Image: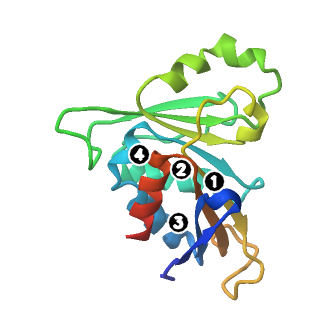
Amino acid sequence: MGTPHAHKAAAGGGVPVLQLHWDSEEDTLAFASRLATCPALAHATLTLHGDLGAGKTTFVRHLLRALGVRGRIKSPTYAVVEPHSSIDCPFMPDNEVLHIWHFDFYRFTDPREWEDAGFRELFASPGLKLVEWPERAADTLSTVDADIQIEPDAMNPAFSDDADSARRVRFTAYTPTGQHLLEALKA
């Protein structure tokens, strides 16, 4: 397994950024597992950016498994949102459930859908929100704690055309919650 390479960089305005390289899906799993140990994740909103096939949903599946989600994990591409829950989350108190919503706004076309679907209430409720294609709902999203940008890394020697190829990852923290998550990733 390749070790994810990381360093902290300053983005515009001093926003904390962690840049990583994933050589394989094992690195994606390791990243998700590390993130799943941070209690700040319980009430975070994370946006995920990347082209089709970049690895956003793969990352989410690994994160959900690391958080203790059991059963089938479906992509919300057609449903727009898939709810999940975990009673086995490593950082939650015994018998307390972690609620998770995985959104995919790829097919989101009309901002009125936001209100009609009750997304405002979901984003206001406790729990973890994972948002793919957030730019399609940008004007309606609540506060984003952190953003994860995933893209193929064609310059990496481990790159190939298959799904298990190298990726460049950029984790940007926008809030104190996002900064706690970034610190957990650096640990």
Q: Nearer the viewer, residue 16 or 23?
A: 16
Residue at x 73% of width, y 55% of height: 50
Residue 111 relative to residue 63: left or right: right
Which element is circle 3 on? helix
| Mark 2 residue crowding within 10 angstroms, few (<14) / some (14–19) / many (20+) | many
Q: Work out whether 129 lies above or below 26.
A: above
Whole-angstrom CA distance, mark 1 to mark 3, is 10 Å
In percent of width and height, residue 179 lies at 47, 54
Residue found at the very far front of the displayed protein: 13
Pointers 1 and 2 in contact (CB under 8 A)? Answer: yes
In front of the other: label 4 or label 2?
4
Mark 3 or 4, closer to the camera: 4
The numbered dot on residue 60 is 2
Residue 107 position in % (x across, y down)? 78, 32
Q: Which residue is mark 4?
A: 41
- Tell me the amino acid under the disc marked 3: Thr
Q: CA distance from mark 3 to mark 4?
A: 17 Å
Horizontal arrangement in the rendering, residue 30 relative to residue 173 (left or right): left
Which residue does the numbered mark 3 point to in the structure image? 28
Q: Which class describes the residues within 10 Å of circle 3: few (<14), some (14-19), or many (20+)? A: many
Question: Badges 1 and 4: C-beta atoms under 8 Å apart?
Answer: no
Q: Which residue is mark 1?
A: 56
Identify the element where label 2 is drawn.
helix
Q: Determine the image quadrant of residue 109.
A: top right
Residue type pointed to by label 2:
Val
Q: Position of residue 137 (x, y in %)?
A: 74, 31
Q: Tag 1: residue type?
A: Lys
